[in-house]
Amino acid sequence: MSDQEFAAFAGAEITPAFPDGLTRLDGNGQCRGDSGAIVREHSHVIIVRYPFNDSGANRRIEMLRTDYKLKFRKESVLRTETVEKVSFRFRLPNKGSSALVRHC
C-alpha cells in the first residue's frame, strides 16, 4: 500500500470516525503470517483520542479495522487501549507567550 492509498483511507474513514483528533506514526514492522513466514512491511500506527464514555467508539474502531483488513488484504490489525490523562498547550492569539492548557 502506498502512502497515498493510506492517506486516502485515513481521510475518507479514520478522520470522519474520530474528528476530534488523531496522530499517525509510521514505522517498519514484522509479524509471522498465517503461512508461518515472517512478513516485513511498512506500518501505520493511529492514535485516536475519544472520551472514555463514548459508547460508539468501540463500534467505529472495529469497523475501521475490518474495512482496513478488507481493503488492503491484511491478516490482522492490532488494537490496544489505554486510559490516559493528556493535555495540550495552545498559544493564545495576540497574547505573547501566554498559554491555555486543555485537559482531555
Image (cartoon, rainbow, N blue to C red):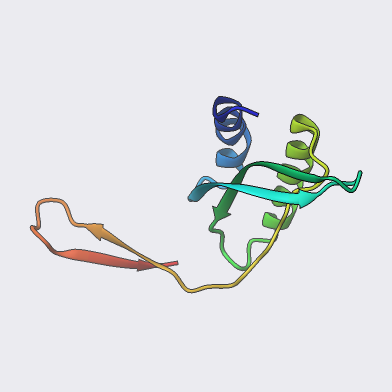
Q: In this view, does 28 lie to the left or right of 61?
A: left
In the foreground, 62 or 26? 26
Residue 41 is situated, as x and y percent measured from the top left of the image, at 67, 40
Which residue occupies the extreme right position in the image? 35
Name above or below for residue 6 compared with residue 66.
Answer: above
User: Which residue is found at the position 11% from the left and 61% from the top?
Assistant: 97
For the point 75% across and 49% down, the residue is 77
Q: Which residue is drawn at 58% across and 27% down?
A: 8
**For residue 17, above or below residue 12:** below
Asked which quadrant contains residue 104, the reply is: bottom left
Residue 63, percent from left and from top: 75, 44
The N terminus - image quarter: top right
Q: In this view, does 96 lie to the left or right of 73?
A: left
Direction front: furthest residue: 37
Q: Position of residue 69 (x, y in %)?
A: 78, 39
Please count the marks in the image.
0
